[in-house]
Amino acid sequence: MNQQNPQTGRAGSDASSHRTINIHQLKTVCSSCSLRELCLPMGLSQEEVEYLDQLVYTRKRIKRGENLYRAGDPFGSLYAVRSGFFKSNLILEDGRDQVTGFHMPGEIMGLDGIGTDDHTCNTTALEDSEVCVIPFARLEELGHQVRNLQKQFHKVMSREIVRDQGVMMLLGTMRAEERLAAFLLNLSQRFNARGYSHTEFHLRMTREEIGSYLGLKLETVSRIFSKFQEEGLVSVQQKHIRILDTDGLKRMLGQAD
Amino acid sequence: MNQQNPQTGRAGSDASSHRTINIHQLKTVCSSCSLRELCLPMGLSQEEVEYLDQLVYTRKRIKRGENLYRAGDPFGSLYAVRSGFFKSNLILEDGRDQVTGFHMPGEIMGLDGIGTDDHTCNTTALEDSEVCVIPFARLEELGHQVRNLQKQFHKVMSREIVRDQGVMMLLGTMRAEERLAAFLLNLSQRFNARGYSHTEFHLRMTREEIGSYLGLKLETVSRIFSKFQEEGLVSVQQKHIRILDTDGLKRMLGQAD
DNA sequence: CGTTGCGTTGAATAAGGTCAAATAGAGTGG
DNA sequence: CCACTCTATTTGACCTTATTCAACGCAACG
């Protein structure tokens, strides 16, 4: 399909019209990617990462609102967020819908598809985004040659399991305020790890999507944002969030009840 | 106690001074294990499974109430349930506790530990049980030689992710009755896959553990069992469950609200 | 045969959900 | 640039669901 080089068959007419991406691609192989320490290559040696460069050569732009894949699509690749922001959600036969995760740069998407060779959730860009395509068969292949890559991949999957269990904990035991506090702290920490401010950021998702993820209704999310604001914990202006009292938010979590 | 063999002190057994278990072990290598099609070897060829036999040679008995591992324990092995029944749970600093899963024969436990080299949850036997110990370093090693084992292992991890996302869905969008109906149907289906009755079984866990898993209080679980019984969906006597109307339970799930 | 842990049931309460209305922004087309 | 539209958000009033608190029953066990 979308080869790494632009349709070589075409004459000059739209050679460039098609995208300058090639050049861009050269700059963004794993070995020189700024997300290297957050993404699949985490912990690999320079030499090992260079192997990865052969594997991850296709990138794909997804516009805001578009799906990267849908439940039921055949699984072929994993995707690393290169830039932008995604959500994943599940839809039940009866129409119920639950956001199962938000994904930011460096995070791997599509792990759900390995088990059945079909994706089991939908993944949608919440802003114009770009992903690195990791053909899974080739990842397994390469893992075979680069032992540390194999190990690293296992760790990525395991961490995803642990993350999901954390969400189960949140949904199973926490009250609405605690859930939202935990959510904000989690975002804060992840932005921080990517070199962004951990006290001030832009929410890419709607109140409804936050609510869906946290098992709450959008009105409840809105009310709690207002409450946190009254209490001086955060400042909220639509999607712009400023955390004023990180410790205060943390304290919300500590109290079993 | 119910050790299948007396302690190794027995004379003459020096060569196999190591335990009469050996005999037992021979009978229960993966290649001749009745759980073969449910467990890690699923889908592997006879020859491939025989490789696994070199790997999985230790088994371990865990008595009811004992932990297989605890959060924070160093991770070294995965465990396949050979017989019995387990639960996993997470405990937050503030004491909150959530059951994150129940495990029955053929299921793999310990995947949470790969990411950090420490277990992140506790896993406890709910009845006297036995597990097959799968040293993880050797599994990675062997996966390197037996490609299909590698693939199979990846599928196991991926399915665990999908399972967890199903639980997120349950906790995030379902009402109490739906949660319990889904829980019963899930158990039913898993018992069925193992050759047990799918309409009649024994719950190994308490109402509190069910509630913890489903994000409900034990009283709520109890009330809903009573309600289901009144409605003729199930017959409940303490931990003994008989499902009288599977379709009725399924119908509970279909209705978005 | 009392103790202990687990399960059931009832009544009161609180946390979130539902419904409805008002407001605020972002994007669009004139 | 402005009016208009559409969607997201906020807020209030009321309602439903599950929790809390408390009492009691049951079965297993020493």
Image (cartoon, coloured by chain):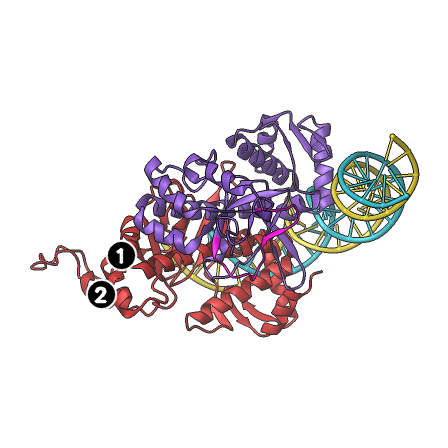
Chain colours: A purple, B red, C cyan, D yellow
Which residue corresponds to mark 1? Answer: B145
Left or right, A64 with reference to A118 = right
Q: Tell me whether the residue at label 1 lies in contact with that at label 2, contact meaning CB atoms closer than 8 angstroms.
A: no
* Span colored in magenta: A61-77
Q: Residue at x 45, y 68 (%)?
A: B191
| Residue B104 in sight from this viewpoint | yes
Magenta stretch, overall SS: loop
Secondary structure of residue under mark 2: helix
Q: Residue at x 46, y 71 (%)?
A: B192
Which residue appears farthest toward the left when viewing the image? B12
Above or below, A221 relative to B27: above
> Residue type at mark 1?
Gln
Kindly indicate the quadrant of the structure image that contains residue A104. Answer: top right
Name the foreground residue: B208 vs A164. Answer: A164
The quarter of the image holding the C terminus of chain A is top right
Judge the density around disc 1: few (<14), some (14-19), many (≥20) Cα neighbours within 10 Å.
some
Q: Is residue A99 magenta?
A: no
Q: Earlier in the sequence, mark 1 or mark 2?
A: 2
Position in image of residue B11 (x %, y %): 8, 58
Above or below, B203 relative to A15: below
Judge the density around disc 2: few (<14), some (14-19), many (≥20) Cα neighbours within 10 Å.
few
Q: Nearer the viewer, mark 1 or mark 2?
A: 1
Q: Is residue A73 magenta?
A: yes
| Residue A255 in sight from this viewpoint | no
Left or right, B240 with reference to B79 = right
The subunit letter for the residue under badge 2 reads: B
Which residue corresponds to mark 2? Answer: B24
Name the foreground residue: A218 vs A108. Answer: A108
Name the foreground residue: A23 vs B139. Answer: A23
Position in image of residue B199 (x %, y %): 51, 73
> Residue type at mark 2?
His
